[in-house]
Image (cartoon, rainbow, N blue to C red):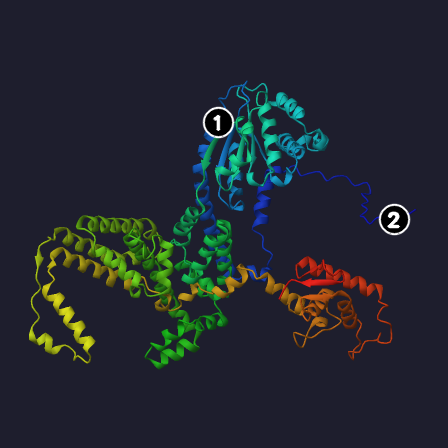
Amino acid sequence: MDPTISVSKGCFVYKNGATRAAKSKTTPNKSKRKRSLGNSSLLGPEITSQPFYTAYGEIWQQLHDHILQLQQESYSRTLDQLVQYLETECGSQVEDSEILPTAALLTGINQTDHLKQFEALTQRLQSRAKVCVLQSRDCSTLKGAIESMVFNLIEGQLEQDSEELEQEIEDRDHKRLRRSQCTMKQLNSWYSNNFQLEQRKRQLVIILPDFECFSSHVLQDFILILSSHCTALPFVLVLGVATAMTAVHSTLPYQVTSKIRLRVFQTQAAPTGLNEVLDKVLLSPKYAFHLSGKAFKFLTHIFLYYDFSIQGFIQSFKYCLMEHYFAGNAFSLCTGYSQALAKIKLLISDDMETIRRLPSFRPYVEQINDCKRIIAILTDDDYLKKKLPQLLRDCLLHFLNFRCALEFVTELVGDLPRCPLGKLKRELYVLSLNKKITSLPEFKECWQMLSFLSKDEFVAKLMKCVTKTEEFMQQEIAPLELGEACLAAMRPQIQEVRQLLDDVVLSTMEAHHPPPPTVESHTESRPITSRQELKAQLLQRSKQDHQPITEFARSLQRILQHIENQIVLPHLRPLQEAPPLHELFVFSDIATVRRNIIGAPRAALHTALNNPHFYMQCKCCELQESQQLMGTLPDLSVVYKLHLECGRMINLFDWLQAFRSVVRANDDGQDVDQNVDQEQIDPQIQARFTRAVAELQFLGYIKMSKRKTDHATRLTW
């Protein structure tokens, strides 16, 4: 019998005397190779050599490094406390005690975001203890959990020894343990041989990152086993709790909790981490790329109302960045001012046409009064290139001034009652880019609340705004390339606010009646055409005649009017009023982002099954009409299109007959088996139909009926 012939199907591997390939001895270069592979691109050199791809790579690397730095800082706040607990309190436990030291790390509901926290914790503890990370998928049974723990602890040590002793790499395969050998007895002997002679016992840290996913019975028995071996093995347990501490108390009964000494650690909340990333990275004036108000709001709403995933938000932002730069080389100008000047020389005629097609370019051309200049800027690429430096400079300065004004106004209105304009920078950022903020009723409500503040409260609030804005300008704006130009525009306005604030401080609360209106002012007023206008005018005059105005109120209104006219109106402008070519720096294609980030699986499945040519792009599946049926379509597509013509209950025999008539139809559309008895079905066609129906049932479109065995129930409408 042929050795490759078997009763059951299978794969047969012939080694032909081949042995396991020896690993290279240059183990220290592994990290370098990984970094080089991580920077490799699936795109060809014709794409990676383009200016837009270079600009995209540079700005994404800067953003990514900045985000990683913030995350490492946020992780270290909790990890420092956790490591200190593991080193001090857990290290000083009584040897004869069977109480298991346990740390509960409240990570938040999104587990994928916090895997990096456990990776950072593992790296911090590698030099001080032996660490084992157990996933719930590997611990479905108690035996599997013990085997995974022992295997990871022992084999991790062997791998570390093999890196230090390169001459024994080939013998490493003989040292590997089998799963059946991974027992607590084996772990005890291994620990006594390696760490028993050390003055300070090395701890064995067991990390369970997804505590809620473990079986309660497996977890209870696992903890009891660890506590029973605490006298010989210094175990420390770390639980990653995603929900709340009530999950721990509900999972572990008293006989288990009495064997552990629990300490709770709280990590940074996901919204707090997102606000930190938004304020310090995405809204930082260091980067030329910006999101429009709608795109920014869309990404934050996905985070707040769907997944609470910071990593998901970062990947969505990266997609927006890719869409922006991959639109063409003209968008490579979205970078620093000096780099943009160097990239202008690389633009070709098609790139200049891309710039001319920007929506803000037409109003810029229409405001030019000279016809020769209009013709030159529309037809001469060299002339437009000469104009680009000033246009780019105006855009970059506009966004720097916008960021300074955003800092000032957020500090001014962020802590007002009910927060009409929001209390975070991202909320005011979205409002300012979408609409003219001074026309919003929320803005008027904020100004009214500010006018109701007492003198001391108003002076303290405005002094804090001025101080915070000056610090922001000095730390964030001044080091930038166009920082001096921005400071030259913003500092006089801030200094004038400080001077007006001095007038508020020196003002008194004495009431002064306004002078009565003269007859000339009454006669020069516009004519009254209705009773409503007469009533409103008389009411206004009565208020002016009888309402006393204090010196403090007058100076307060003066400073609020200055802030509105000199800071808010000129700088917190919506995108419609931004300088020309601002589209090069702002991504606003919200439809593309919504279509690609938020999937529509039902629509995609319907399109794939109803018209396979949309995805497969094969000529045999090309349809003239969406309702057309052809035998060249995939069997699943034919069955799906036939099931759309049925009602709630589908007769399987009729369905099979229709399927056969479509599949075996000739070119004229006539069935070649018309004279054959319908009861005689080709087994091959029946098998294809059965497989297609099973696939359709797997997709959730039908289910087999319990009332009628020869019918299927349609689950869609």
Query: Which SS class for mark 2?
Result: loop
Which residue is tagged 1? 87
Q: Quadrant of the C terminus?
A: bottom right
Where, by quadrant of the figure, is residue 545 drawn?
A: bottom left
Residue 164 percent across, percent down from the top left: 61, 30
Q: Residue at x 61, y 34 (%)?
A: 217
Q: In the image, which disc is placed on residue 200? A: none
Where, by quadrant of the figure, is residue 225 drawn?
A: top right
- Of 60 and 571, the residue lying toward us: 571
- Of 574 and 164, the residue lying toward us: 574
Above or below, comparing residue 227 to residue 595 in the picture: above
Residue 3 percent across, percent down from the top left: 88, 45
Amino acid carrying mark 1 in the image? Glu
Residue 576 percent across, percent down from the top left: 37, 68
CB contact under 8 Å: marks 2 and 1? no
Q: CA distance from mark 2 to mark 1?
A: 60 Å
Which residue is tagged 2? 5
Left/right placement of residue 657 relative to residue 248 reads: right
Above or below, comparing residue 103 to residue 416 in the picture: above
Q: Residue at x 8, y 62 (%)?
A: 513
Above or below, comparing residue 595 to residue 479 in the picture: below
Q: Residues within 10 Å of mark 2 (few under 14, many from 20)?
A: few
Query: Which SS class for mark 1?
Result: helix
In this rendering, does residue 165 appear at all?
no
How many marks can you see?
2
Q: Residues within 10 Å of mark 1 (few under 14, many from 20)?
A: some
